[in-house]
Image (cartoon, rainbow, N blue to C red):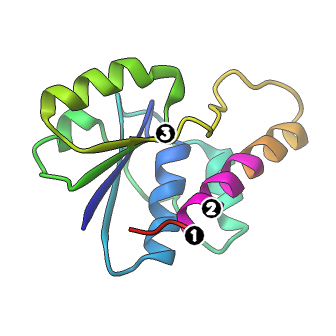
Amino acid sequence: MKILFLCTLNAVRSPIAEALARQYHPDHEFHSAGLIAGPPDYFAIEVMQELGLDISTRESRSFENLKHKNFDLVICLASENSKEIVEMLKSSKLKYELWNDIPSPADMGGSRLMRLFVYREIRDKIKAKVKNWRI
């Protein structure tokens, strides 16, 4: 099965999901993208390194660059853009699921420790979903 994880910038949620899915479900093909390609997110890189997974060398991709890859399933992780994404996926005739319980780190402020705490929560929510996922 060929699966795409889609979020806003392809910097936090979708690359985390892609790396975890590859670890827990190596018999499937996983990719990630954003509505637009964003810059690397060093907090996401750090919390994934805590699990021994390196996402530091991956290149951010936009959905536009991948939409013709014939995915079996697209998992939307960007609840803040879910209406836009659903319309885009419907027009592409792709099967999709919405994982709306994964928050965006975009509006988060606070100290480095506070931000890392929130990133770990996001990572761990995604990890629980992916680990227990029945594909």
The dominant secondary structure in magenta is helix
Q: What element carries label 2?
A: helix
Earlier in the chain: of badge 3 and badge 1, it is 3
Q: Where is residue 15 in the image (x, y as percent from the top left)?
A: 48, 52
Left or right, 31 with respect to 64, comes to right
Q: What element carries label 1?
A: helix
Q: Quadrant of the C terminus?
A: bottom left
**C-alpha gap between disc 2 and disc 3:** 13 Å
**C-alpha gap between disc 2 and disc 1:** 6 Å
Tell me: residue 25, above or below residue 113: below
Name the residue at the front extreme.
134
Q: Which amino acid does label 1 sit on?
A: Lys
Name the disc covering residue 77, or none.
Answer: 3
Question: Label 2: which residue?
Answer: 127
Q: Where is residue 101 in the image (x, y as percent from the top left)?
A: 62, 38
Q: Position of residue 115 (x, y in %)?
A: 80, 38
**C-alpha gap between disc 3 and disc 1:** 16 Å
Q: Identify the residue at image location x=31%, y=73%.
A: 28
Q: What element carries label 3?
A: loop
Q: Identify the residue at image location x=76%, y=48%.
A: 121
Tell me: residue 53, above or below residue 8: below
Left or right, 39 with respect to 85, comes to right
Task: Give the camera-side residue of 44 and 31.
Answer: 31
Task: State yes or no: residue 127 in magenta.
Answer: yes
Question: Label 1: which residue?
Answer: 131
Q: What residue type is labelled 3?
A: Leu
Provide the residue span drawn in magenta: 121-131
Q: Residues within 10 Å of mark 2 (few under 14, many from 20)?
A: some
Name the disc covering residue 94, or none.
Answer: none
Label pair 2/1, CB-CB below 8 angstroms: yes
Earlier in the chain: of badge 2 and badge 3, it is 3
The quadrant holding residue 130 is: bottom right
